[in-house]
Image: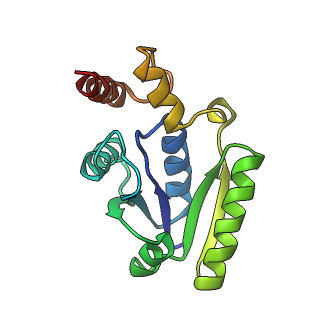
Amino acid sequence: MKKAVYPGSFDPVTFGHLDIIERSARMCDHLIIGVLNNYSKTPLFSVEERVNMLKSLTSNFANVEVKSFGGLMIDFVRANQADAVVRGLRAVTDFEYELQIAQTNRVIAPEVDTVFLTTNLKYSYLSSSIVKEIASYGGEINAFVPEEIAERVREKIEDRTK
């Protein structure tokens, strides 16, 4: 793969996301992490905050770039002249959803392939939603996200409850 896009909301970025980033960065010449600005949702972190957190966490990868996008992911992929989309799969339910998206994208952009990476087993249960829920009840999240992200999540949740 020459250039690939790994899209997601990354709200917040988890160890599972970082696992997919590290593995896909080894597989391609240039990996673009596309941070979705979903206007229909209210994320914990702004798109700028998520981009900056990912830039900090991936600064040791020379071939990784972080950008935000809105709208259709396939348009972002085409605009960045990428050859492939990378998606992480935790379970069969992820596969069913991701397969529909991949097939739809293939109709829209037949030149773009989708590559599925199964998540490391130790992260197969993990999602950003679970991290936010645990943190919202004061639970410990350091096993799920890097320390700097855990601190930011706790601060955001504390600010929202004031």
Q: Residue furthest right?
A: 92
Q: Position of residue 65 (x, y in %)?
A: 35, 60
Which quadrant, please, contains the C terminus?
Answer: top left
Q: Position of residue 114 (x, y in %)?
A: 63, 68
Tell me what residue is drawn at x 61 percent, y 51 percent: 88
Q: Position of residue 10 (x, y in %)?
A: 43, 46
Tell me what residue is drawn at x 65 percent, y 79 percent: 106
Towards the viewer: 64 or 112: 112
Towards the viewer: 37 or 78: 37
Query: Does 126 appear above or below 23?
Result: above
Towards the viewer: 127 or 114: 127
Residue 3 in sight here: no
Tell me what residue is drawn at x 42 percent, y 73 percent: 76
Residue 91 in the figure: left or right of residue 137:
right
Residue 83 in the figure: left or right of residue 93:
left
Residue 115 in the figure: left or right of residue 156:
right
Residue 140 in sight here: yes
Which quadrant, please, contains the N terminus?
Answer: bottom right
Tell me what residue is drawn at x 26 percent, y 47 percent: 52
Q: Position of residue 158 (x, y in %)?
A: 27, 21
